[in-house]
Image: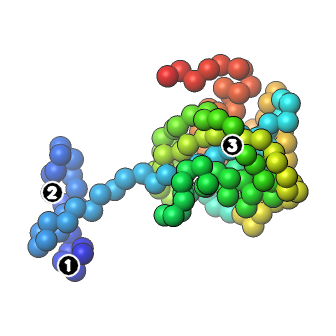
Amino acid sequence: MACGHALEERELDGRPRRVCPACGLVHWENPVPAAAVVVLRGREVLLCRRAVPPREGCWGLPAGYQEIDESAESTAVRETREETGLIVRLTGLIDVLSTTDDPRKPSLLVVYSGEEMGGELCPGDDCAEVAFHSLDELPQELAFHNDRVVLERLRSGAPRPW
C-alpha cells in the first residue's frame, strides 16, 4: 500500500490481515477513538436527536470521533459544543465501551460526565433537536446500544461492572 502494490490477505497473529507482498506493510484495521459526554440537570440528561445517518431521528448522547490532533477529553468538549451549543467542563470518567453497532466503523467510546459552564442550548448542524430528558422517561428511539447502556445505568444508579 505504501509502495503502491496491491494488498493480499495473509494470516498474521492468528488473524487474516491485509499485507503488502512487496514491502511487508500491514494494513491494521483498528477501532477509532470517540468520546461522549453525560450532562445532567438533576435527573434529566442532555440528548441530541440525530439529523444525519446513521440512525437519523434517533436520540443519543452528544458524541463524536476524535480528530488526529485531539485528546479524548478535548473531543468530548468539542463535540458537546458543536452538537448542543453548551460549553462543558469534564468532571469524571463514566465508562469506556466498544461500539460495534455503528455501520460507519467500530470505535472505542470514552464516556465522560460533564458540567455546564456556559453556552446556549441549540442544535448543531448534525442535530435536529437537543433537549434534556428525564432519566425516568427516556425516548424509545435511542441511536446506539451504548447510549442505552449508559443511560440505563444512570437511571438505575447501578455502578459500572468492572
- The tag earlier along the polypeptide, 1 or 3, is 1
Instruction: Tell me which amino acid carries mark 1.
Output: Cys
**Element marked by disc 1:** loop
User: Which image quadrant: the N terminus?
Assistant: bottom left
Residue 28 rendering spot, x and y as whole percentages: 29, 57
**Tag 3: Cα neighbours inside 10 Å, few (<14), some, or many (≥20)?**
some
Q: Which residue is mark 2?
A: 10
Q: Nearer the viewer, residue 92 or 153?
A: 92
Could you tell me how far apart the alpha carbons at marks 2 and 1 are, in whole angstroms?
Answer: 18 Å
Question: Does residue 45 appear left or right of residue 74 in this picture?
Answer: right
Residue 90, labelled with which disc?
A: 3
Residue occupying the far bottom of the picture? 4
Q: Nearer the viewer, residue 62 or 100?
A: 62
Marks 1 and 3: CB-CB under 8 Å?
no
Question: Does residue 113 appear left or right of residue 46 in this picture?
Answer: left
Residue at 84% in and 29% down: 43
Residue depth check, mark 1 versus mark 3: number of the one nearer the observer: 3
Q: Which residue is mark 1?
A: 3
Question: Does residue 103 appear left or right of residue 37 in this picture?
Answer: left
Q: Nearer the viewer, residue 58 or 91?
A: 91
State which quadrant residue 6 falls in. bottom left
Marks 2 and 1: CB-CB under 8 Å?
no
Residue at 85% in and 52% down: 118
